[in-house]
Image: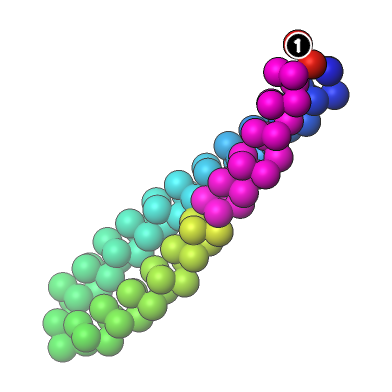
Amino acid sequence: MLEIAIIVAGVIIGCGIALISGGLVGIGEGYVAGKAVEAMARQPEMEGSIRTTMLLGQAVSESGAIYSLAVTLLLIFTVVLPLVNRLLELL
């Protein structure tokens, strides 16, 4: 019974780390968007090129956040829920 609790605790800590990494991606995207606006203000004639590069970079970095969310949901629904159900059966 203690083994199940340790596994569940480890998975929950891993899910928390994955979600924090996904949140940090949002901070990075905000920083990139701010710098892109600054660049557009300095060089208005390059606005289209700057915007295209910014959106492409944000799309690539957003995939990391989506992967972290997918891993978290996968761990919760395939590892944690069956173990919690088994733990409840043992009680």
Which quadrant would residue 45 be assigned to in this image?
A: bottom left
Q: Residues within 10 Å of mark 1 (few under 14, many from 20)?
A: few
Q: At which x and y percent is residue 13?
A: 65, 33
Q: Which residues are magenta?
A: 68-89
Q: Quadrant of the N terminus?
A: top right
Most prominent secondary structure in the magenta stretch? helix
Q: At which x and y percent is residue 19?
A: 53, 44
Residue placed farthest to the front in the image?
A: 89
Which quadrant would residue 78 be assigned to in this image?
A: top right
Residue closer to the observer: 90 or 42: 90
Q: Pointer 1: what residue? A: 91
Residue 21 visible in the displayed image: no
Classify mark 1: helix, strand or loop.
loop
Residue closer to the observer: 74 or 68: 74
51 displayed left or right of 12: left
Q: Quadrant of the C terminus?
A: top right
